[in-house]
Amino acid sequence: MRPDFSSSTAFKTPWAFFNRQARAMRLAVLAREALIAEAELTPKPGLVDRRGAGTHNDLSLSIMRRSAFTIEPYFCEMAAFSQGTHPSQELRERLAVVGREAERAMFRVTNGSNSHKGAIWILGLLISAAALHTENGVKVSKITSTAKEIASFADRATPRLVSHGDMVAKKYGVAGARGEALRGFPHVVDVGLPMLRSKRASGATERVARLDTLLSIMSRLDDTCLLYRGGKMALVAAKEGAIAVSRSGGSGTAIGRQKLFRLDHRLLELGVSPGGSGDLLAATLFLDAVERSRNEVQPDQSGSEDQDGAD
């Protein structure tokens, strides 16, 4: 699918057209790179990474990569038609239509496995919000507040089928992915980004910074992926395990690594994974790159150290 740029009234000149086309493509590339960076980050507790499929018997790292590339054009389309507009019912519902097309494409390329359904919702909103602001280095708070406004409009054409996330959110009284958006992505703005940047400033490797960011999100998020597959026991185990790593100095310390692998083993025993936290890590990496006006998500050049197992 190719983005339709021709319908936007914002394209007054050929130069403006190509500038906006380039911006839409850049945002889509950053989103795809963020998804792949999240998938490749190793070792993650319970999740797909370079070691294997975690607790997922229907996913692999190659499937995650293929899925990310498959949905990239849909992200580009979302960014393209969002430029020159404003949060509205029409924009919300147009995003939903393309989002459902992206989901169908994802399921086709993964043979029916859910690799990035939650990420399509989260990153779709953030890409649209980022595209509405044409200035370079737009603040994350501005993007997330705009995404919150877009999410506040109902999708009147939404299928009547209730998603697993919505079902779990209602059952346990937690926010879920929709609630996260309607609150302005607090686990990205107030948890993920501060941890990522603090760790970088302290001299941590990019791998450690990202792992500790994931763990900080896990320690705070009522992850509906965990609740759906393992109930409250799984959520408590994940939160307590993530906190234990943090209190031991993080994934960059010997004790922290031991506790990280202990958490990984526990989640494997329970057969659960923190998929919601993984999606929000990808959102964190995406917004970090956008705010810093990067043309790519910062590479993880930490090497293969500690990627195959505990010391």
Image (cartoon, rainbow, N blue to C red):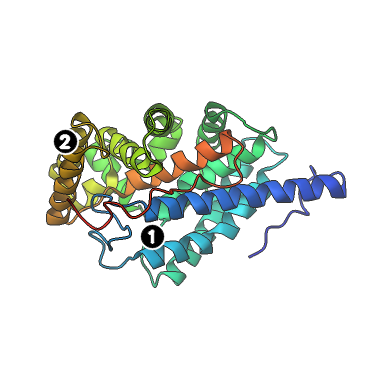
**Residue for point 62% across, 53% down:** 76
Kindly identify the amino acid type of the residue bearing the numbered disc 1: Ser
Residue 125 visible within the image: yes
Instruction: Tell me, for residue 115, which label it has, or none.
Output: 1
Is there CB contact under 8 Å for labels 1 and 2? no
Q: Quadrant of residue 187?
A: top left
Location of residue 149 in the rendering, given as x and y in whole percent from the top left corner = 54, 32
On screen, residue 86 versus residue 233, left or right, reads right
Q: Quadrant of the N terminus?
A: bottom right
Location of residue 215 in the rendering, given as x and y in whole percent from the top left corner = 28, 38
Which residue in the protein does label 2 denote? 240
Kindly identify the amino acid type of the residue bearing the numbered disc 2: Glu
Q: Report crowding for label 2: few under 14, some 14 to 19, many 20 or more residues within 10 A (C-alpha).
A: some
**Residue for point 40% across, 26% down:** 190
Vertical position of residue 112 compared to residue 224: above or below: below
**Residue for point 36% across, 66% down:** 113
